[in-house]
Image (cartoon, helix red, strand yellow):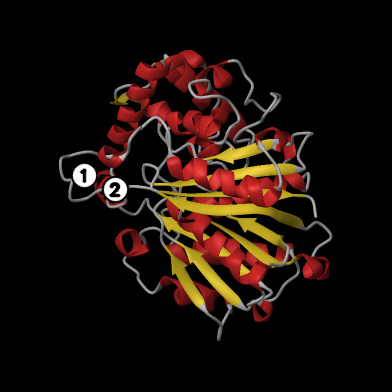
């Protein structure tokens, strides 16, 4: 297997864009990415699109060539990948395998979602299709109610408190306020975070990620060719994808996600690193409890210690392990199909010292964890210096 590098990255702001369609968002991110590494559309040998529900949200199918040709990329394989919220993380994983195996050299990955053209009720229906439609969703569950059950069980098992959940929201809002591309640039207090509008007990409005529009793109190349395009390549040290049951009632323990643990273990093994070697991370905080559990499943803290870790400030920008310096899904936004690649872009920004007011000093090894559904899919990627 060849060593692989990220040579280019680009993304749109995340938010509510009534005058933008899915294709225009994807093209903006893709063109930024091409410019970022001085590449041309004709140099792209394979194209991957991460997208969860373009047909339902935007009324368009056959999306990979629909996007690639709009970018001027023709006559190459164009493949759409769907893995719920982990769609573009999975697309990135499959693009990496092509480059690592020597099938192609220069591969682009775009993640995109246009969600806000539908009503809130319809958005919730579409998102629910990533769950167990014949069982728990048919019974009336939403992902908010499922993660509320997860949070409640975590509280019962480990003594996790609402203050712990709120601390995650406060931190990520503080980071998002410094991110010019974030959807929610609003600093909140712990008291505000605890008093948000109830959604599904114990989760309130501040515990839930945003409905968003946006796109992100990266280009991969063999490490030995990376400096043909950029003097700031970022190496993929380790990457893995894992899966698990879709429905909560099939899981032995809903306070942990086996797919996150397995993907993390495989990525650490490939990189020759462990949790203590990670200097910062972008974790999938679709709900605040998801970030807390991810810190535990990835070995950053022990089981049940994720909540206090956040409340005590250890995951803040100036803490021992900065998490979600981008603002995370909670404040940056969560255009579902774009999230995984956006996490990679945010790691690259930090490692290139281009994160502006959010820049952290220890930034040579970063990890991204992209979760799908209630833990049915997960991609973990570790990036480092070339």
Where's the N terminus, which quadrant? bottom right
Horizontal and vertical percent for residue 329?
50, 40
- Residue at x 48%, y 59% (from the top left corner): 112
Where's the C terminus, which quadrant? bottom right
The residue identified by callout 2 is: 131
Specify few, some or many for label 1: CA neighbours under 10 Å numbering under 14, 14-19, or 20 or more: some
Q: Disc 1 on helix, strand or loop?
A: loop
Q: Is residue 55 left or right of residue 346?
A: left
- Residue at x 61%, y 30% (from the top left corner): 300
Q: In which quarter of the image is residue 151?
A: top left
Specify few, some or many for label 2: CA neighbours under 10 Å numbering under 14, 14-19, or 20 or more: many
Horizontal and vertical percent for residue 357?
72, 35
Q: Is residue 139 left or right of residue 170?
A: left
Q: Residue furthest left?
A: 139
Depth check: 196 or 258 in front?
A: 258
Q: Confirm whether residue 108 shows in the render.
A: yes
Horizontal and vertical percent for residue 269?
64, 48
Figure label count: 2
Horizontal and vertical percent for residue 58?
35, 62
- Residue at x 52%, y 80% (from the top left corner): 77
Vertical side of 56 occupied by 184: above or below:
above
Q: Residue furthest bottom?
A: 75
- Residue at x 38%, y 52% (from the top left corner): 115
Q: In this view, does 363 lie to the left or right of 249?
A: right
Circle nearer the N terminus (1, 2): 2
Q: Disc 2 on helix, strand or loop?
A: loop
Which numbered disc covers residue 340? none
Contact? badges 1 and 2 (CB < 8 Å): yes
Depth check: 285 or 113 in front?
A: 285
The residue identified by callout 1 is: 137
Depth check: 125 or 107 in front?
A: 107
């Amino acid at each position: 297997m060849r060593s692989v590098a990220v040579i280019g990255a680009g993304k749109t702001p995340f938010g509510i864009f009534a005058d933008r369609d899915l294709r225009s968002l994807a093209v903006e991110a893709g063109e930024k990415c091409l410019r970022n590494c001085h590449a041309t559309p004709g140099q792209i040998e394979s194209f991957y699109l991460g997208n969860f529900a373009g047909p339902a949200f935007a009324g368009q199918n056959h999306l990979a060539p629909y996007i690639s040709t709009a970018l001027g990329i023709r006559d190459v394989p164009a493949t759409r990948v769907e893995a719920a919220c982990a769609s573009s993380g999975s697309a990135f994983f499959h693009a990496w395998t092509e480059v690592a195996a020597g099938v192609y050299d220069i591969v682009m990955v775009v993640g995109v979602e246009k969600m806000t053209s539908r009503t809130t009720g319809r958005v919730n229906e579409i998102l629910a299709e990533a769950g167990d439609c014949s069982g728990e969703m048919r019974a009336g569950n939403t992902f908010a109610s499922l993660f509320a059950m997860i949070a409640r069980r975590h509280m019962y098992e480990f003594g996790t408190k609402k203050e712990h959940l709120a601390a995650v929201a406060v931190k990520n809002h503080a980071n998002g306020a410094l991110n010019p591309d974030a959807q929610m640039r609003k600093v909140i207090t712990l008291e505000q975070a605890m008093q948000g509008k109830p959604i599904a007990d114990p989760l309130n409005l501040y515990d839930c990620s945003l409905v968003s529009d946006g796109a992100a793109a990266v280009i991969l190349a063999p490490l030995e060719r990376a400096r043909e395009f950029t003097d700031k390549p970022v190496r993929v040290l380790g990457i893995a994808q894992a899966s698990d049951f879709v429905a909560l009632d099939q899981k032995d323990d809903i306070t942990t996600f086996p797919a996150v643990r397995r993907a993390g273990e495989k990525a650490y093994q490939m990189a020759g690193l462990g949790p203590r070697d990670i200097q910062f991370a972008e974790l999938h905080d679709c709900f605040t409890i998801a970030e807390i559990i991810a810190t535990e499943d990835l070995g950053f803290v022990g089981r049940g210690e994720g909540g206090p870790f956040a409340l005590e400030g250890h995951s803040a920008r100036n803490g021992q392990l900065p998490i979600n310096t981008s603002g995370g899904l909670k404040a940056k936004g969560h255009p579902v199909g774009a999230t995984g690649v956006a996490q990679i872009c945010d790691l690259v920004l930090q490692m290139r010292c281009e994160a502006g007011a959010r820049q952290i000093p220890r930034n040579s090894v970063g990890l991204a964890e992209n979760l799908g559904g209630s833990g049915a899919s997960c991609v973990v990627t570790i990036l480092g210096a070339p």
